[in-house]
């Protein structure tokens, strides 16, 4: 894997966004393997495909690429808000690649995979409508709030200019498959509980510590009248899936 974009023919492109798209998509096509099955190459779809940019010829999984020159820590711009929400709620999303690159060095700095089953409406932020003077007046875009995605769903393929081992990437992706939930409400609960656990600074935590998130979870799930019972249910699920271990007497331990 070469972190440099290399020499790419861009003479027929004029806008900076077109040039950036060609460079970043060419890099993925030339360098990226399938993080789902380990196939050494993924293929580029034809241009202007509405859902995805790449697919794996082996496992047929699809990927969409989003790139920016700034940090990937918080958010990244995406397309129309209603379109994204419809994709998430219909389970038609591809997996997402997020790229951070340097314009100065023309190198990839960070490259992250987020599998589709980690997407819930809560991580999609509605932007303000475009002004009446804009060419697409009233159009509403969105941001993907990467910071709201649990750490278990952020698979770092390249991190701070360092290429992570392919086998460790595949291992984390396969582990994350255990968290795949089709029902959107159940998925939302699971993502919220994971984020709560991840925000606890210690490896060992208690049920009492989890109950401290009751008000926060109640505000996110106002239709649920027994949040603490739901917390216990989700902890049991994560224990069964091997993400936490029950130590007894209301104590749990995070598992790598």
Image (cartoon, helix red, strand yellow):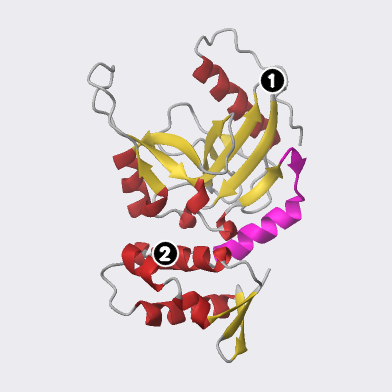
In the image, is residue 101 above or below residue 162? above
The residue located at (67%, 17%) in the rendering is 8
Which quadrant is home to the C terminus? bottom right
Circle 1 residue: 104
Q: Residue 214: name its quadrant.
A: bottom left
- Distance of label 1 from label 2 (alpha carbons): 40 Å
Which residue range is magenta in the image? 160-177
Circle 2 residue: 187
Which of pointers 1 and 2 indicates the residue nearer the eye?
1
Instruction: Please provide percent x and percent y for residue 68.
Output: 56, 31
Sort mark 2 into few (<14), some (14-19) or many (20+) by Cα contacts within 10 Å.
Answer: some
Which quadrant is home to the N terminus? top right
Most foreground residue, 225 or 43: 225
Instruction: Please provide percent x and percent y for residue 199.
Output: 55, 63
The residue located at (63%, 52%) in the rendering is 155
Q: Residue 120: name its quadrant.
A: bottom left
Can you name the residue that lies furthest to the bottom here? 249
Q: Are marks 1 and 2 in contact (CB under 8 Å)?
A: no
């Amino acid at each position: 894997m070469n972190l440099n974009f290399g020499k790419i023919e861009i003479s027929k492109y004029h806008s900076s966004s077109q040039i950036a798209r060609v460079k970043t998509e060419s890099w993925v096509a030339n360098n990226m393997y399938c993080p789902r099955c380990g196939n050494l190459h993924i293929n580029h779809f034809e241009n202007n495909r509405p859902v995805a940019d790449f697919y794996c010829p082996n496992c047929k999984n699809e990927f969409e690429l989003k790139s920016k020159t700034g940090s990937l820590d918080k958010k990244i711009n995406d397309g129309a808000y209603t379109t994204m929400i419809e994709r998430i709620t219909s389970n038609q999303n591809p997996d997402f690649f997020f790229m951070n690159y340097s314009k100065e060095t023309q190198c990839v700095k960070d490259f992250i995979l987020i599998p589709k089953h980690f997407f819930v409406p809560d991580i999609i932020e509605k932007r303000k409508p475009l002004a009446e003077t804009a060419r697409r007046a009233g159009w509403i875009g969105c941001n993907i709030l990467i910071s709201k995605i649990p750490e278990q769903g952020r698979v770092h393929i390249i991190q701070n200019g360092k290429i992570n081992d392919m086998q460790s990437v595949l291992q984390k992706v396969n582990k994350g498959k255990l968290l795949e939930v089709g029902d959107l409400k159940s998925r939302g609960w699971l993502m919220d509980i994971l984020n709560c656990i991840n925000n606890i600074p210690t490896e060992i935590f208690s049920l009492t510590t989890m109950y401290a998130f009751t008000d926060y979870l109640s505000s996110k799930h106002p239709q649920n009248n027994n949040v603490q019972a739901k917390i216990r249910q989700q902890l049991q699920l994560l224990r069964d899936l091997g993400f936490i271990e029950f130590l007894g007497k209301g104590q749990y331990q995070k598992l790598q």
